[in-house]
Structures are given as structure tokens and as C-alpha cells.
Image (cartoon, rainbow, N blue to C red):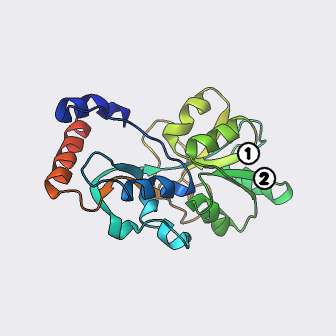
Amino acid sequence: MRLLDGPFRSKFKQPLIIDNRPGTRGNIAAAAVARSTPDGYTLLVTADTVVTSNPRLYQELEFKADRELVPVIYLANTSQTLVCHSSLPVRSVADRMTYARSHDVSYASGGKGAPVHWMFQAATGLRMTHGPYKGPNAAMQGMIEGHVQCGFLSMAVVMPHVKSGRLKVLAVTTARRLPNGMELPTMSEAGITGYEATFGDLVLAPRGTPPHVVATLNETFIAVLAH
């Protein structure tokens, strides 16, 4: 989002202010945007889980995603990587599963209800200690500091720490290998048949935002992403 600051200043004569509101899988930020004035000045950048899985996983929410938020643009598809602290004696997903059968393995997620909270355990039958954090950056920091051993996080978040040797990547959650030259196996290739987890990054606005404002924002995002 910081890359948009220049184009947004030029287009709207306003600075782009990023106000991170981590917690409860994006629900805190979504509720704040849903309650904001629908004038186009307050937007929500979030994973699609805010409108897909969260309403089904959280019994009480302060907002109704399908009634109080409207789409501006679908930014990108994102995937996750299975990463572990460099000190964990595993080199593959199979190693990790074998290790977890005889050792207590902890794993980080962006909070209770996060897909990683249940998908991997449901697919493998393993029971591990869950360490919920307020967001992916906090989860990554928890792994770097050794508070938890593994986690599912985006490639962009973990790569600097993989290159430094603090973390190691075991697999990616996409259906096909990523074209980044690392030749990382997919979860299916690593032995978790049928495992795939791909998410979308969205920009949403409060319902009631004038259609022409939404259209202008959409056009601006498209113009920036095209360069």
C-alpha cells in the first residue's frame, strides 16, 4: 500500500495514511471501516477471509461484511509457505510430521479461526500447540524469537528471514510451484495430498460510498498496478 502514496497524492491531493488495526483475523479493522463515513476516504485492505470464512467462524461480529462493505478492487492472489525456525531438526514436510508425532511442536497463526488453525491439522491428523498472534508480522516475530517453532505465512513476509538463515521454508500452499526459482515443493508434492490454500487481497469501502467514488478508486488502483 505504501507504493500507492505517490499516485494517490497526485490523483486526490491527499496523503495515503496507513492505520494498521491487527487482531481477530481482520475483524477489528473491518468493523472500524464499516462504521466510518462512506465518503471514499476510509478503505479496508484485507484478506478475503474477512468476507468468506470469518462470518462463519466468529459467532459475534460488530459488522456484517455482506451488508456493510462494498468491493473496490481485487488486488491479488496470495499463498502461504510452511516455515519453521532454523533450529528445528526438520528439512521437509515429511520430517516435520514425523517429528511432531514424538515431540510437542508449536505453530503460529494470525489468530484463532485462521485457516492454518485447522486446515493442516485436519489434513494430517496431527495435534500441535497453537500460538495465535494478532497478525502475520507478529507471528513471524514469534518464530524468529523462538517462541513458536513453525507457521504458515506469506512468502513476502518470510523471505528476508529465510535468506538470513533464521527461518527455513518447507513447502508452499499453492497447487503449483511458485515461479521464484526456489523450487519449493507444494504441500501435495510433499505428501499432503489435495492440500491447497490460496487467498485474495481485497480493497473494500463502507456501504453507501457513492458509486462514482468507488469507480474512481478502482480506476486509480488499476492504473497503479499496471506499472
If you read the primary sequence from the N terminus, does the residue marked by circle 2 or circle 1 appear first? 2
Rendered view: 187 above or below 164: below
Number of numbered markers? 2
User: Decide: marks 2, 1 in contact (CB < 8 A)?
Assistant: yes
Q: Where, quadrant-wise, is the C terminus in this rendering?
A: top left
- Name which residue type carries label 2: Val
User: In the image, is 146 to the left or to the right of 12?
Assistant: right
- Which numbered disc covers residue 105? 2
Residue at left 19%, top 29%?
Answer: 10
Residue at the spot of label 1: 149
Rendered view: 47 above or below 19: below
Q: Position of residue 137 (x, y in %)?
A: 57, 40
Q: Position of residue 212 (x, y in %)?
A: 13, 53
Q: Does residue 169 appear in the picture of this structure?
A: no
Q: Does residue 19 appear in the picture of this structure?
A: yes
Nearest the eye: 93 or 25: 25
Q: For mark 1, does the 10 Å Cα neighbourhood hold few (<14), some (14 to 19), or many (20 or more) residues?
A: many
As drawn, which residue projects farthest toward the right? 102
- Name which residue type carries label 1: Gln
Q: In terms of secondary structure, where does tag 2 sit?
A: loop
Nearest the eye: 108 or 89: 108
As drawn, which residue projects farthest toward the left? 212
Residue at left 78%, top 52%?
Answer: 105
Q: Position of residue 162 (x, y in %)?
A: 60, 33
Residue at left 52%, top 49%?
Answer: 80
Residue at left 40%, top 38%?
Answer: 18
Q: Where, quadrant-wise, is the N terminus in this rendering?
A: top left
Rendered view: 142 above or below 203: above
User: In the image, is 147 to the left or to the right of 102?
Assistant: left
